[in-house]
Image (spheres, rainbow, N blue to C red):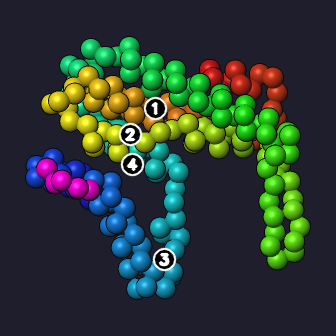
């Protein structure tokens, strides 16, 4: 987290022509992981095991709050209607479409897996709730590339709409993922989609 915020401060101050603070963080993470792997020979692998609760409760909120703190608030709130439509409504539409199309294709036995060692083709079957969990991840779009090529000074409305849509989209996707995960151990009924949407 500190590397991410430090890199963001450097990028904001020196206006580098290429790269992004996320890339710096990923490169640092890969280098740190390789160093730990070669130095400790996986003796401390459990210490660095990924924890969902730490990620969702401690790491993700500062990143989202940081994005909100650094945004141009006046233009964002002037375009809140467009931002809400693209960020909230379209995320639900994508989630519904991805889920429905994937479910239909699974029922039609469209997806199969070929094992090269045995030569056997096996039809892929996925239960509805894990499918919803997967499609909740797919409906999240990343706007880093789009925001990095748009200048706020030249196109403030477009920049605000894309940036706001990215924040709303990520938030809604996280909420959808957690909502589906909360019912993942239950049996799928007709009320399950309404529970998730609620």
Q: In the image, 95: left or right of 70? A: right
Q: Nearer the viewer, mark 1 or mark 4?
A: 1
Question: On the image, numbered disc 4 is attached to which residue?
Answer: 59
Mark number displayed over residue 147: none
User: Which stretch did the figure color magenta?
Assistant: 15-19
Q: Nearer the viewer, mark 3 or mark 1?
A: 1
Earlier residue among tags 2 and 1: 2
Task: In the rendered view, tell whether residue 28 sits above or below residue 74.
Answer: below
Cβ–Cβ below 8 Å for labels 4 and 2?
no
Tell me the residue at 65%/28% (across/down).
Answer: 96
Residue 146 is situated, as x and y percent measured from the top left of the image, at 34, 40
Question: On the image, numbered disc 3 is attached to which residue?
Answer: 44
Tell me the residue at 53%/70% (across/down).
Answer: 46
Q: Nearer the viewer, mark 3 or mark 4?
A: 4
Q: Is residue 61 visible?
A: no
Earlier residue among tags 3 and 1: 3
Earlier residue among tags 2 and 3: 3
Q: Residues within 10 Å of mark 2 (few under 14, many from 20)?
A: some
Name the element at disc 3: loop
Q: Residues within 10 Å of mark 1 (few under 14, many from 20)?
A: many
**From the image, which quarter does the N terminus lie in?**
bottom left
Please tell me in which quadrant of the rendered image residue 198 appears. Answer: top right
Q: Main secondary structure of the magenta part?
A: loop
Question: On the image, numbered disc 2 is attached to which residue?
Answer: 143
Inspect the magenta stretch and tell me whether residue 55 lies in it. no
Q: Nearer the viewer, mark 2 or mark 1?
A: 2
Cβ–Cβ below 8 Å for labels 2 and 1?
yes
Q: In the image, 87: left or right of 128? A: left
Q: Residues within 10 Å of mark 3 (few under 14, many from 20)?
A: few
Q: Is residue 42 visible?
A: yes
Question: On the image, numbered disc 1 is attached to which residue?
Answer: 169
Earlier residue among tags 4 and 2: 4
């Amino acid at each position: 987290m500190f590397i991410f915020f430090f890199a963001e401060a450097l990028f904001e101050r020196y206006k580098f022509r290429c790269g992004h603070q996320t890339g710096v963080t990923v490169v640092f993470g890969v280098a740190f992981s390789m160093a730990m792997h070669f130095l400790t020979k996986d003796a401390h692998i459990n210490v660095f095991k990924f924890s969902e609760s730490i990620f969702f409760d401690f790491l993700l909120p500062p990143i989202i709050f940081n994005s909100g703190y650094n945004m141009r608030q006046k233009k964002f709130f002037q375009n809140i209607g467009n931002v809400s439509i693209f960020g909230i409504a379209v995320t639900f539409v994508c989630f519904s479409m991805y889920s429905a199309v994937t479910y239909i294709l699974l029922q039609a036995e469209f997806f199969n897996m070929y094992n090269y060692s045995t030569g056997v083709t096996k039809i892929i079957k996925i239960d509805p709730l894990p499918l919803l969990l997967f499609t909740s991840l797919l409906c999240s779009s990343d706007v880093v590339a789009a925001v990095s090529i748009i200048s706020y000074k030249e196109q403030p409305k477009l920049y605000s709409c894309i940036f706001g849509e990215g924040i709303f989209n990520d938030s809604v996707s996280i909420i959808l993922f957690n909502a589906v995960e909360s019912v993942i151990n239950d049996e799928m009924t007709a009320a399950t989609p309404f529970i998730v949407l609620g």
